[in-house]
Amino acid sequence: MFAPARYGVRCGAIILLSAGLAACGSIDSASQRLASAITPYKIDVVQGNFISKEQVDALKPGMGRQQVKEILGTPLVMPLFHTDRWEYIFTLKRPGIEQQTRKLTVFFKDDVLDRFEGDEMPTEAEFVASLGSKAAKNKVPNLEATEDQLKRFPAKPDPSPASNPGNEPPSAPLSTSYPPLEAPK
């Protein structure tokens, strides 16, 4: 190859390499702008047992462990060195809302319920209402038409014989029987 041709090829390669590196920088900044504009979906994280006020009210001293388990469910923590207590912990993390944490500790003496202590528990209705507050941001559209809206659409003609001025024969009624699914043998 001639020296001027090699020089031209080298210059061309350097220009292409420089343009490629400059393009990478603009692609990188564009991807960063796109990533900052798109927010990822964040899920609600629920851990532990939800204990309602109604469940706590059902607990009575003297109940057996199985009875307590039937009312509250399996405890989240059963300490190895404190076999006389069960701990129920409920945590709810929702994006944009403060984390909810509630604890209830149940104490046993000789395998019967002695006492329980913990946070004030909400009723089931209060808890469900607190969950719905996030979805209430979206306005539900009205699905009923007003009289004014209905007047904009013409009424369908009445198919009664009195409204048939040309005495045309009425159309045949629709068949209510269907052909068999299998061919006769």
Image: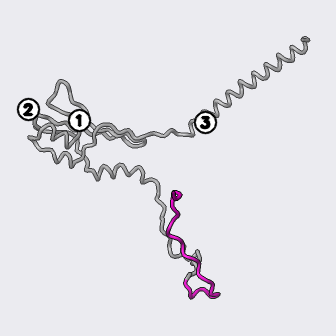
Disc number lying in front (2 or 3) = 2
Q: Where 151 sits versus 78, above or below?
A: below
Provide residue 73's location: percent of width, then percent of height: 23, 40
| Residue type at tag 1 | Pro
Q: Residues within 10 Å of mark 2 (few under 14, many from 20)?
A: few
Q: Residue at x 48, y 40 (%)?
A: 41
- Given residues 58 and 131, the one toward you in this image is 58
User: In the rendered image, which residue does mark 2 sit on?
Assistant: 110
Q: Residue furthest front?
A: 185
17 or 175: which is nearer to us?
A: 175
- Identify the residue at image location x=86%, y=14%: 7
Q: Judge by depth and name the residue closer to the eye, 131 or 156.
A: 156
Residue 156 percent across, percent down from the top left: 57, 77
Which label lies toward us, 1 or 3?
1
Q: What is the spatial separation of the Cα atoms under label 2 and label 3, in whole angstroms?
A: 64 Å
Closer to the chain start, of discs 1 and 2, is 1
Return the x and y of residue 3 as percentages of the image width and height: 90, 11
Measured Cα–Cα span from mark 1 to mark 3 = 46 Å
> Is residue 12 left or right of 113 when viewed as pictured?
right
The residue at 79%/22% (across/down) is 15
Q: Is residue 33 left or right of residue 145?
A: right
In the displayed structure, would residue 139 be above or below residue 77?
below
Q: Secondary structure at mark 3?
A: helix
Q: Quadrant of the N terminus?
A: top right
Label 3, residues with CA under 10 Å away: few <14, some 14-19, many ≥20: few
The magenta segment: 160-185
Reply yes or no: does residue 183 show up in magenta: yes
Q: Which residue is mark 1?
A: 75
The disc at residue 33 is: 3
Amino acid found under the numbered disc labelled 3: Arg
For residue 52, above or below residue 83 = below
